Image: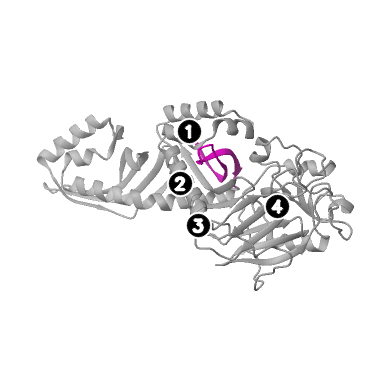
Amino acid sequence: MPGLCAFALAALFLAAAPAIGHAQGRIVGQVVQSGMPSGDAVLATSIPSGTSQGWLAQFAGNPAGPPQFLAVNKQAQELYVFEQKSPLAMVEKITCTTGEREGDKLVEGDLRTPEGVYFIQQRLSAGLDYKDYGTLAHTLNYPNPVDRLKGKTGGGIWIHGRGHQITPRETKGCVALNNDAILELDKRLSRNLPVLIAHNVDWRPEDTNFAESETLVRLVEDWTRAWESRSDTFFDFFDAEKFSKSGDESFQAFKAHKANLFKNLPWLQVRSHNIHALPGPDYWVTWFEQYYRSPSLSSGGIKRLYWMKDATGNWRVVGNEWVDADQESLRGMEARYLLDSLQQVRELVDAWRDSWLKADLDRYMAFYGNAASQGGRYGKRAIQDHKLAIWTDKRPTRVEFGALDVKLHPQGLVVGFSQEYEDAKGYKDKGFKTLVMQPRGNGWEILSEDWQAM
Protein backbone atom coordinates (compact mmCIF):
# COMPACT_ATOMS: atom_id res chain seq x y z
CA MET A 1 0.00 0.00 0.00
CA PRO A 2 1.66 3.28 -1.02
CA GLY A 3 1.82 6.54 0.84
CA LEU A 4 0.56 6.59 4.39
CA CYS A 5 0.74 2.81 4.82
CA ALA A 6 4.53 3.07 5.02
CA PHE A 7 3.93 3.71 8.71
CA ALA A 8 3.10 0.00 8.97
CA LEU A 9 6.77 -0.58 9.68
CA ALA A 10 6.40 1.26 12.98
CA ALA A 11 7.76 -0.35 16.15
CA LEU A 12 5.95 -3.25 17.82
CA PHE A 13 4.74 -3.15 21.40
CA LEU A 14 3.58 -5.95 23.71
CA ALA A 15 -0.03 -6.08 24.83
CA ALA A 16 -2.41 -8.84 25.73
CA ALA A 17 -5.36 -9.42 23.42
CA PRO A 18 -8.61 -8.15 24.96
CA ALA A 19 -11.48 -10.50 25.50
CA ILE A 20 -13.91 -11.04 22.65
CA GLY A 21 -17.65 -10.71 23.11
CA HIS A 22 -19.99 -13.58 23.78
CA ALA A 23 -22.01 -14.01 20.61
CA GLN A 24 -23.67 -17.41 20.72
CA GLY A 25 -23.25 -20.27 18.25
CA ARG A 26 -21.29 -20.62 15.02
CA ILE A 27 -21.84 -18.27 12.11
CA VAL A 28 -21.26 -20.33 9.00
CA GLY A 29 -21.91 -17.96 6.09
CA GLN A 30 -19.67 -18.91 3.20
CA VAL A 31 -17.05 -20.58 5.38
CA VAL A 32 -16.45 -24.20 4.37
CA GLN A 33 -17.19 -26.58 7.23
CA SER A 34 -17.87 -29.89 5.55
CA GLY A 35 -14.70 -31.09 3.89
CA MET A 36 -12.22 -31.02 6.72
CA PRO A 37 -10.21 -34.24 6.99
CA SER A 38 -10.03 -35.99 10.33
CA GLY A 39 -6.90 -36.79 12.30
CA ASP A 40 -5.20 -33.41 12.74
CA ALA A 41 -6.32 -30.94 15.37
CA VAL A 42 -5.11 -28.04 13.27
CA LEU A 43 -4.26 -28.63 9.65
CA ALA A 44 -2.84 -26.26 7.04
CA THR A 45 -2.95 -26.98 3.32
CA SER A 46 -2.18 -25.04 0.17
CA ILE A 47 -3.80 -25.14 -3.23
CA PRO A 48 -0.96 -25.30 -5.80
CA SER A 49 0.38 -21.97 -6.94
CA GLY A 50 0.05 -20.84 -10.51
CA THR A 51 -3.72 -20.38 -10.26
CA SER A 52 -5.84 -17.47 -9.10
CA GLN A 53 -6.48 -19.39 -5.89
CA GLY A 54 -4.25 -19.64 -2.85
CA TRP A 55 -4.14 -20.94 0.69
CA LEU A 56 -7.02 -22.97 2.10
CA ALA A 57 -6.64 -22.37 5.84
CA GLN A 58 -7.91 -25.37 7.78
CA PHE A 59 -8.03 -25.43 11.57
CA ALA A 60 -9.99 -26.69 14.55
CA GLY A 61 -10.24 -26.07 18.27
CA ASN A 62 -6.81 -26.64 19.78
CA PRO A 63 -5.39 -26.31 23.33
CA ALA A 64 -2.32 -24.57 21.88
CA GLY A 65 -4.42 -22.10 19.90
CA PRO A 66 -4.61 -18.45 20.95
CA PRO A 67 -7.53 -17.23 23.08
CA GLN A 68 -8.66 -14.99 20.21
CA PHE A 69 -7.68 -14.51 16.59
CA LEU A 70 -9.00 -13.15 13.29
CA ALA A 71 -9.35 -14.98 9.98
CA VAL A 72 -9.85 -13.25 6.63
CA ASN A 73 -11.62 -15.22 3.90
CA LYS A 74 -10.62 -13.53 0.64
CA GLN A 75 -12.96 -15.63 -1.48
CA ALA A 76 -16.01 -14.75 0.62
CA GLN A 77 -14.74 -11.20 1.33
CA GLU A 78 -15.40 -11.73 5.03
CA LEU A 79 -13.48 -11.31 8.27
CA TYR A 80 -14.18 -13.68 11.16
CA VAL A 81 -13.48 -13.30 14.87
CA PHE A 82 -12.67 -16.61 16.58
CA GLU A 83 -12.43 -17.36 20.27
CA GLN A 84 -11.29 -20.49 22.09
CA LYS A 85 -14.44 -21.25 24.05
CA SER A 86 -14.00 -25.05 24.39
CA PRO A 87 -14.89 -25.63 21.62
CA LEU A 88 -13.57 -23.05 19.17
CA ALA A 89 -16.30 -20.57 18.24
CA MET A 90 -16.76 -17.94 15.58
CA VAL A 91 -18.20 -14.99 17.48
CA GLU A 92 -18.51 -12.47 14.66
CA LYS A 93 -18.56 -12.28 10.86
CA ILE A 94 -17.90 -8.95 9.14
CA THR A 95 -17.96 -7.99 5.47
CA CYS A 96 -14.54 -6.85 4.25
CA THR A 97 -12.74 -6.10 1.01
CA THR A 98 -9.24 -7.15 -0.05
CA GLY A 99 -6.83 -6.58 -2.95
CA GLU A 100 -8.06 -5.90 -6.47
CA ARG A 101 -6.24 -8.97 -7.82
CA GLU A 102 -6.74 -12.52 -6.56
CA GLY A 103 -3.94 -14.75 -5.29
CA ASP A 104 -1.15 -14.37 -2.75
CA LYS A 105 0.89 -11.18 -2.65
CA LEU A 106 4.33 -11.67 -4.21
CA VAL A 107 5.77 -8.25 -5.06
CA GLU A 108 5.21 -4.64 -4.13
CA GLY A 109 2.43 -3.05 -6.12
CA ASP A 110 0.82 -6.29 -7.36
CA LEU A 111 -2.53 -5.26 -5.81
CA ARG A 112 -2.84 -8.59 -3.97
CA THR A 113 -3.49 -9.26 -0.29
CA PRO A 114 -0.85 -11.51 1.33
CA GLU A 115 -1.80 -14.94 2.68
CA GLY A 116 -0.40 -16.41 5.87
CA VAL A 117 -0.30 -15.81 9.62
CA TYR A 118 0.25 -12.21 10.66
CA PHE A 119 0.07 -10.17 13.85
CA ILE A 120 -1.32 -6.74 14.61
CA GLN A 121 1.46 -4.25 15.31
CA GLN A 122 0.16 -0.76 15.89
CA ARG A 123 -3.09 1.18 16.15
CA LEU A 124 -3.32 4.35 14.02
CA SER A 125 -6.08 6.91 14.50
CA ALA A 126 -4.47 10.22 13.53
CA GLY A 127 -3.33 11.64 10.21
CA LEU A 128 -5.25 9.13 8.08
CA ASP A 129 -6.67 9.95 4.67
CA TYR A 130 -10.37 9.47 5.40
CA LYS A 131 -11.30 8.47 1.87
CA ASP A 132 -8.82 5.58 1.77
CA TYR A 133 -8.52 4.57 5.43
CA GLY A 134 -11.50 5.94 7.30
CA THR A 135 -10.70 6.96 10.86
CA LEU A 136 -8.87 3.88 12.13
CA ALA A 137 -6.19 1.41 11.02
CA HIS A 138 -4.23 -1.47 12.56
CA THR A 139 -0.92 -2.38 10.93
CA LEU A 140 0.22 -5.97 10.25
CA ASN A 141 3.73 -7.48 10.20
CA TYR A 142 3.84 -8.25 6.47
CA PRO A 143 6.32 -9.35 5.24
CA ASN A 144 6.88 -11.91 7.98
CA PRO A 145 10.07 -14.04 8.07
CA VAL A 146 8.63 -16.74 5.78
CA ASP A 147 7.51 -14.07 3.30
CA ARG A 148 11.06 -12.69 3.24
CA LEU A 149 12.45 -16.21 2.88
CA LYS A 150 10.29 -16.61 -0.23
CA GLY A 151 11.47 -13.30 -1.64
CA LYS A 152 8.15 -11.50 -1.27
CA THR A 153 8.33 -7.72 -1.27
CA GLY A 154 6.13 -4.80 -0.37
CA GLY A 155 4.75 -3.72 2.97
CA GLY A 156 2.22 -1.45 4.62
CA ILE A 157 -0.53 -4.06 4.85
CA TRP A 158 -3.21 -2.83 7.22
CA ILE A 159 -6.67 -3.65 8.48
CA HIS A 160 -8.42 -0.29 8.15
CA GLY A 161 -11.66 1.57 7.65
CA ARG A 162 -12.95 3.25 4.52
CA GLY A 163 -14.44 6.66 3.85
CA HIS A 164 -17.16 5.15 1.67
CA GLN A 165 -19.24 1.96 1.50
CA ILE A 166 -16.86 -0.85 0.55
CA THR A 167 -17.23 -3.04 -2.54
CA PRO A 168 -15.54 -6.42 -3.14
CA ARG A 169 -11.81 -6.45 -4.00
CA GLU A 170 -11.16 -2.73 -4.08
CA THR A 171 -7.92 -2.24 -2.09
CA LYS A 172 -4.29 -2.21 -3.18
CA GLY A 173 -3.56 -5.10 -0.79
CA CYS A 174 -4.94 -4.13 2.60
CA VAL A 175 -8.00 -5.57 4.33
CA ALA A 176 -10.64 -2.83 4.56
CA LEU A 177 -13.92 -2.71 6.49
CA ASN A 178 -16.70 -0.19 6.49
CA ASN A 179 -15.69 2.53 8.90
CA ASP A 180 -18.46 1.86 11.41
CA ALA A 181 -17.51 -1.85 11.35
CA ILE A 182 -13.85 -1.28 12.23
CA LEU A 183 -14.81 1.16 14.96
CA GLU A 184 -17.02 -1.56 16.45
CA LEU A 185 -14.31 -4.21 15.98
CA ASP A 186 -11.64 -1.97 17.52
CA LYS A 187 -12.45 -2.98 21.10
CA ARG A 188 -11.46 -6.55 20.19
CA LEU A 189 -8.19 -5.69 18.49
CA SER A 190 -4.83 -5.36 20.19
CA ARG A 191 -1.16 -5.52 19.40
CA ASN A 192 0.08 -9.07 18.77
CA LEU A 193 -3.41 -10.42 17.99
CA PRO A 194 -3.00 -13.14 15.30
CA VAL A 195 -4.62 -12.63 11.90
CA LEU A 196 -4.91 -15.51 9.41
CA ILE A 197 -5.42 -14.33 5.82
CA ALA A 198 -6.36 -17.03 3.33
CA HIS A 199 -8.10 -17.62 0.00
CA ASN A 200 -10.67 -19.67 1.89
CA VAL A 201 -11.25 -20.78 5.47
CA ASP A 202 -12.25 -24.29 6.59
CA TRP A 203 -12.73 -24.85 10.32
CA ARG A 204 -14.48 -26.97 12.89
CA PRO A 205 -15.09 -26.37 16.59
CA GLU A 206 -12.97 -29.14 18.06
CA ASP A 207 -10.88 -32.24 17.42
CA THR A 208 -9.28 -34.94 19.52
CA ASN A 209 -5.86 -35.26 17.88
CA PHE A 210 -3.45 -32.44 18.62
CA ALA A 211 -0.27 -34.19 17.46
CA GLU A 212 1.15 -31.42 15.28
CA SER A 213 0.52 -28.56 17.66
CA GLU A 214 1.71 -30.61 20.64
CA THR A 215 4.92 -31.37 18.74
CA LEU A 216 5.53 -27.67 18.13
CA VAL A 217 4.86 -26.75 21.76
CA ARG A 218 7.24 -29.46 22.92
CA LEU A 219 9.89 -28.23 20.48
CA VAL A 220 9.61 -24.72 21.93
CA GLU A 221 10.11 -26.15 25.43
CA ASP A 222 13.13 -28.18 24.27
CA TRP A 223 14.51 -25.12 22.43
CA THR A 224 14.19 -23.08 25.63
CA ARG A 225 15.99 -25.70 27.74
CA ALA A 226 18.81 -26.03 25.18
CA TRP A 227 19.28 -22.25 25.18
CA GLU A 228 19.29 -22.00 28.97
CA SER A 229 21.76 -24.87 29.31
CA ARG A 230 24.02 -23.23 26.70
CA SER A 231 24.10 -26.48 24.76
CA ASP A 232 25.35 -26.82 21.19
CA THR A 233 22.11 -28.67 20.50
CA PHE A 234 20.41 -25.25 20.57
CA PHE A 235 21.72 -24.61 17.06
CA ASP A 236 20.28 -27.87 15.75
CA PHE A 237 16.78 -26.41 16.02
CA PHE A 238 17.51 -24.03 13.13
CA ASP A 239 17.60 -24.37 9.37
CA ALA A 240 20.78 -22.40 8.76
CA GLU A 241 20.16 -21.58 5.09
CA LYS A 242 16.53 -20.54 5.46
CA PHE A 243 17.19 -18.63 8.69
CA SER A 244 19.84 -16.57 6.91
CA LYS A 245 17.37 -15.60 4.18
CA SER A 246 14.46 -14.72 6.44
CA GLY A 247 16.06 -11.98 8.51
CA ASP A 248 18.72 -9.29 8.63
CA GLU A 249 21.41 -11.54 10.13
CA SER A 250 23.12 -14.61 8.72
CA PHE A 251 22.88 -17.81 10.71
CA GLN A 252 26.68 -17.85 10.98
CA ALA A 253 26.65 -14.43 12.66
CA PHE A 254 23.73 -15.44 14.89
CA LYS A 255 25.51 -18.64 15.94
CA ALA A 256 28.82 -16.88 16.59
CA HIS A 257 27.12 -14.30 18.81
CA LYS A 258 25.22 -16.93 20.80
CA ALA A 259 28.27 -19.19 21.12
CA ASN A 260 30.29 -16.28 22.50
CA LEU A 261 27.61 -15.61 25.12
CA PHE A 262 27.42 -19.30 26.00
CA LYS A 263 31.17 -19.33 26.57
CA ASN A 264 31.55 -16.13 28.54
CA LEU A 265 28.39 -15.72 30.61
CA PRO A 266 28.54 -17.36 34.04
CA TRP A 267 24.81 -18.07 33.75
CA LEU A 268 21.70 -17.28 31.79
CA GLN A 269 18.05 -18.10 32.30
CA VAL A 270 15.21 -18.29 29.78
CA ARG A 271 11.56 -18.65 30.70
CA SER A 272 8.85 -19.36 28.10
CA HIS A 273 5.18 -19.11 29.07
CA ASN A 274 1.80 -19.30 27.31
CA ILE A 275 3.01 -21.05 24.18
CA HIS A 276 0.59 -20.79 21.25
CA ALA A 277 0.70 -22.23 17.74
CA LEU A 278 -1.10 -21.61 14.45
CA PRO A 279 -0.58 -23.05 10.95
CA GLY A 280 0.35 -21.04 7.89
CA PRO A 281 0.32 -22.17 4.24
CA ASP A 282 3.45 -24.36 4.54
CA TYR A 283 4.72 -23.35 7.97
CA TRP A 284 3.68 -23.00 11.60
CA VAL A 285 4.12 -20.05 13.91
CA THR A 286 4.67 -20.49 17.64
CA TRP A 287 4.71 -17.49 19.93
CA PHE A 288 5.05 -17.09 23.67
CA GLU A 289 6.02 -14.77 26.49
CA GLN A 290 9.78 -14.93 26.95
CA TYR A 291 11.72 -13.65 29.95
CA TYR A 292 15.52 -13.68 29.70
CA ARG A 293 18.11 -12.98 32.37
CA SER A 294 21.91 -12.91 32.47
CA PRO A 295 24.37 -10.81 34.50
CA SER A 296 24.50 -8.31 31.64
CA LEU A 297 20.90 -8.22 30.39
CA SER A 298 17.31 -8.74 31.45
CA SER A 299 14.54 -8.58 28.88
CA GLY A 300 10.95 -9.63 28.38
CA GLY A 301 8.61 -9.73 25.43
CA ILE A 302 6.91 -11.86 22.82
CA LYS A 303 9.05 -14.29 20.83
CA ARG A 304 7.75 -15.73 17.57
CA LEU A 305 9.36 -18.75 15.96
CA TYR A 306 8.50 -19.71 12.38
CA TRP A 307 8.85 -23.44 11.64
CA MET A 308 9.10 -25.40 8.38
CA LYS A 309 9.89 -29.06 7.79
CA ASP A 310 13.30 -29.94 6.38
CA ALA A 311 14.08 -32.61 3.79
CA THR A 312 13.92 -35.31 6.47
CA GLY A 313 10.51 -34.20 7.75
CA ASN A 314 11.80 -32.57 10.94
CA TRP A 315 10.61 -29.16 12.05
CA ARG A 316 13.27 -26.42 11.97
CA VAL A 317 13.19 -22.74 12.89
CA VAL A 318 13.46 -20.71 9.69
CA GLY A 319 12.86 -17.28 11.19
CA ASN A 320 12.00 -15.40 14.34
CA GLU A 321 10.57 -12.11 15.55
CA TRP A 322 10.84 -10.30 18.87
CA VAL A 323 8.45 -7.74 20.38
CA ASP A 324 9.64 -5.88 23.50
CA ALA A 325 7.28 -5.92 26.46
CA ASP A 326 5.81 -2.66 27.67
CA GLN A 327 6.64 -1.71 31.24
CA GLU A 328 3.45 -3.12 32.74
CA SER A 329 3.88 -6.46 30.98
CA LEU A 330 7.56 -6.59 31.93
CA ARG A 331 6.70 -6.07 35.58
CA GLY A 332 4.25 -8.94 35.31
CA MET A 333 6.94 -11.20 33.82
CA GLU A 334 9.37 -10.25 36.57
CA ALA A 335 6.75 -10.97 39.23
CA ARG A 336 6.05 -14.40 37.75
CA TYR A 337 9.78 -15.13 37.55
CA LEU A 338 10.20 -14.23 41.23
CA LEU A 339 7.18 -16.33 42.18
CA ASP A 340 8.54 -19.30 40.23
CA SER A 341 11.99 -18.83 41.82
CA LEU A 342 10.64 -18.43 45.35
CA GLN A 343 9.87 -22.11 45.84
CA GLN A 344 13.36 -23.14 44.72
CA VAL A 345 14.94 -20.55 46.97
CA ARG A 346 12.77 -21.52 49.94
CA GLU A 347 13.74 -25.19 49.56
CA LEU A 348 17.42 -24.28 49.26
CA VAL A 349 17.37 -22.01 52.32
CA ASP A 350 15.56 -24.67 54.37
CA ALA A 351 18.11 -27.33 53.39
CA TRP A 352 21.00 -24.91 54.04
CA ARG A 353 19.59 -24.11 57.51
CA ASP A 354 19.25 -27.82 58.27
CA SER A 355 22.88 -28.50 57.32
CA TRP A 356 23.96 -25.57 59.49
CA LEU A 357 21.93 -26.75 62.49
CA LYS A 358 23.42 -30.25 62.16
CA ALA A 359 26.95 -28.87 61.64
CA ASP A 360 27.20 -30.99 58.48
CA LEU A 361 30.17 -29.18 56.97
CA ASP A 362 30.32 -30.94 53.60
CA ARG A 363 26.62 -30.52 52.99
CA TYR A 364 26.73 -26.92 54.24
CA MET A 365 29.56 -25.94 51.91
CA ALA A 366 27.81 -27.48 48.89
CA PHE A 367 25.40 -24.52 48.91
CA TYR A 368 28.19 -22.00 48.20
CA GLY A 369 29.80 -20.98 44.94
CA ASN A 370 33.56 -21.26 44.59
CA ALA A 371 33.98 -17.47 44.79
CA ALA A 372 31.49 -16.98 47.61
CA SER A 373 32.02 -14.49 50.40
CA GLN A 374 30.76 -14.58 54.00
CA GLY A 375 31.29 -11.49 56.06
CA GLY A 376 34.99 -10.70 55.65
CA ARG A 377 35.92 -14.15 54.34
CA TYR A 378 36.35 -14.79 50.62
CA GLY A 379 36.30 -18.14 48.88
CA LYS A 380 34.87 -21.50 49.93
CA ARG A 381 38.07 -22.56 51.70
CA ALA A 382 38.05 -19.53 54.00
CA ILE A 383 34.36 -20.06 54.82
CA GLN A 384 34.93 -23.75 55.47
CA ASP A 385 37.92 -23.17 57.78
CA HIS A 386 35.96 -20.60 59.78
CA LYS A 387 32.93 -22.87 60.26
CA LEU A 388 35.11 -25.84 61.17
CA ALA A 389 36.83 -23.82 63.88
CA ILE A 390 33.51 -22.67 65.36
CA TRP A 391 31.64 -25.98 65.14
CA THR A 392 34.46 -28.01 66.66
CA ASP A 393 33.88 -26.26 69.95
CA LYS A 394 30.44 -24.62 69.71
CA ARG A 395 27.91 -26.58 67.73
CA PRO A 396 24.67 -24.79 66.73
CA THR A 397 21.59 -25.65 68.79
CA ARG A 398 19.07 -23.25 67.27
CA VAL A 399 18.89 -21.64 63.81
CA GLU A 400 15.56 -19.99 62.96
CA PHE A 401 14.66 -17.86 59.95
CA GLY A 402 11.81 -15.45 59.35
CA ALA A 403 9.84 -15.00 56.14
CA LEU A 404 11.94 -14.68 52.99
CA ASP A 405 12.00 -11.48 50.94
CA VAL A 406 13.22 -12.25 47.41
CA LYS A 407 14.14 -9.56 44.88
CA LEU A 408 16.00 -9.32 41.60
CA HIS A 409 19.74 -8.67 41.79
CA PRO A 410 22.26 -8.11 38.96
CA GLN A 411 23.95 -11.37 39.94
CA GLY A 412 20.70 -13.29 40.29
CA LEU A 413 18.55 -12.85 43.39
CA VAL A 414 18.92 -11.17 46.76
CA VAL A 415 17.20 -12.95 49.64
CA GLY A 416 16.65 -11.28 53.00
CA PHE A 417 15.24 -12.65 56.26
CA SER A 418 15.52 -12.34 60.03
CA GLN A 419 17.74 -14.89 61.78
CA GLU A 420 17.95 -16.13 65.37
CA TYR A 421 20.96 -18.22 66.43
CA GLU A 422 22.12 -20.10 69.54
CA ASP A 423 25.06 -22.45 70.15
CA ALA A 424 25.97 -25.13 72.68
CA LYS A 425 27.97 -22.69 74.83
CA GLY A 426 24.98 -20.40 75.35
CA TYR A 427 25.87 -17.72 72.80
CA LYS A 428 22.85 -16.26 71.02
CA ASP A 429 22.18 -13.43 68.60
CA LYS A 430 19.47 -12.01 66.38
CA GLY A 431 20.02 -10.21 63.12
CA PHE A 432 19.10 -9.77 59.49
CA LYS A 433 20.70 -12.11 56.96
CA THR A 434 21.20 -11.15 53.31
CA LEU A 435 22.09 -13.76 50.70
CA VAL A 436 22.95 -13.00 47.10
CA MET A 437 22.30 -16.09 44.99
CA GLN A 438 23.24 -16.83 41.42
CA PRO A 439 21.88 -19.60 39.18
CA ARG A 440 23.73 -22.92 39.13
CA GLY A 441 22.40 -25.62 36.84
CA ASN A 442 18.70 -25.96 37.55
CA GLY A 443 19.03 -24.37 40.97
CA TRP A 444 20.92 -21.69 42.89
CA GLU A 445 24.12 -21.21 44.87
CA ILE A 446 25.10 -18.65 47.50
CA LEU A 447 27.39 -15.99 46.09
CA SER A 448 27.60 -13.76 49.16
CA GLU A 449 26.31 -13.83 52.74
CA ASP A 450 26.08 -10.88 55.11
CA TRP A 451 24.59 -10.41 58.58
CA GLN A 452 23.62 -7.30 60.51
CA ALA A 453 22.61 -7.27 64.17
CA MET A 454 19.05 -6.29 65.00
Q: Quadrant of residue 186?
A: bottom right
Residue labelled with disc 1: 235
Identity of the amino acid at label 2? Glu
- Distance from Cα at disc 2 to Cα at disc 3: 16 Å
Q: Is residue 132 visible?
A: yes
Residue labelled with disc 3: 210
Q: Residue at x 74, y 37 (%)?
A: 153
The stretch of residues the image draws in magenta is 297-325
On whether residue 324 falls in the magenta region, the answer is: yes
Q: Quadrant of residue 168?
A: bottom right
Residue labelled with disc 2: 221
Q: Which mark is residue 197?
A: 4
- Distance from Cα at disc 4 to Cα at disc 3: 22 Å
- Indicate the secondary structure of the residue bearing disc 4: strand
- Distance from Cα at disc 2 to Cα at disc 4: 28 Å
Above or below, comparing residue 259 to residue 167 in the picture: above
Identity of the amino acid at label 4? Ile
- Distance from Cα at disc 3 to Cα at disc 1: 26 Å
Given the current orientation, which residue lies at the most extreme bottom position?
24
- Indicate the secondary structure of the residue bearing disc 1: helix
How many other residues sit within 10 Å of disc 1, few (<14), some (14-19) or many (≥20)? some
- Distance from Cα at disc 4 to Cα at disc 1: 31 Å
Q: Is residue 50 left or right of residue 443?
A: right
- Indicate the secondary structure of the residue bearing disc 2: helix
Q: If you read the primary sequence from the N terminus, does the residue marked by circle 4 or circle 3 appear first?
A: 4
> Are the residues tagged 1 and 2 within 8 Å (C-beta)?
no
Assign the magenta stretch its main secondary structure: strand
